[in-house]
Amino acid sequence: MSHRASFARTAVLSTMLVLFVAACGAPLAVSPLERRAQAIDRSLICPICPGETIDQSQVELAKQMRAVVREKLALGWTSNQIQQFFVERYGAGVLAAPPRRGFDLVAWVVPPVAVLVGIVGLWLALRSLRGRSTDTPQPSANDANESLDQYLAQVDKSLERSGSANDERTDMKGRDPKQ
């Protein structure tokens, strides 16, 4: 096979591969009705699977709930009407986000307030630490050198003392006389 034929075949295969990858990654056209249905699916918790919305759950009840959502949307129901329909059947626990009224409002107010209190507390703590660090004098390089010199002088004295003690215990040949 010639070099040109090999190159042409490689180019065709590469082009086909690029087109295949592009086709696999291309998003499918989704109707506005289906987008609304998917948004509602994400807002309803599956009564069987704790912590999973009906768009995540694969149990039969979640599949039935998704079908009901699409059926109600086709009939012209609003998102709130559909959510209320499921609340009447399964209770307020079927909602992924608690309603923003009554006692459930606490779930919406407390977390941001707690974050703000935490930020203010952290700021105050850092401010007090910064104030303390400027009050205490920092050792200079000369102070460090002086303390190092003092330490080394003590080590030298200690070595001299231990060296003279060793000299007294050994004879001229470096052996211990007691042996």
Image: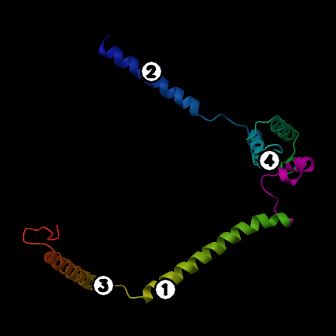
Quadrant of res 153: bottom left
- In three-dimensional space, the C-alpha distance between marks 2 and 3, rounded to whole angstroms, equals 70 Å
Choose mark 2 or mark 3, whichever is in front.
3
Residue 78 lies, in percent from the top left, at 85, 48
Q: Which residue is mark 1?
A: 131
Choose mark 4 or mark 3, whichever is in front.
3
Residue 99 lies, in percent from the top left, at 82, 59
Q: Which residue is mark 2?
A: 13
- In three-dimensional space, the C-alpha distance between marks 1 and 2, rounded to whole angstroms, equals 68 Å
Q: Residues within 10 Å of mark 3 (few under 14, many from 20)?
A: few
Question: Which is more N-terminal, label 2 or label 4?
Answer: 2
Q: Amino acid at mark 2?
A: Leu
Identity of the residue drawn at 76% across and 36% down: 58
Label 2, secondary structure: give it: helix
Q: Amino acid at mark 4?
A: Ile
Q: Which residue is mark 4?
A: 45
Question: Which is more N-terminal, label 1 or label 4?
Answer: 4
Residue at the extreme left of the image, as rendered: 172
Q: Residues within 10 Å of mark 2 (few under 14, many from 20)?
A: few
Q: Which residues are magenta?
A: 83-102
Choose mark 4 or mark 2, whichever is in front.
4
Q: Determine whether, in the image, residue 162 is placed left or right of residue 35.
A: left
Question: Which is more N-terminal, label 3 or label 2?
Answer: 2
Question: Which is more N-terminal, label 3 or label 1?
Answer: 1
Quadrant of res 8: top left
Is there CB contact under 8 Å for labels 2 and 3?
no
- In three-dimensional space, the C-alpha distance between marks 1 and 3, rounded to whole angstroms, equals 20 Å
Label 1, secondary structure: give it: helix
Q: Amino acid at mark 1?
A: Gly
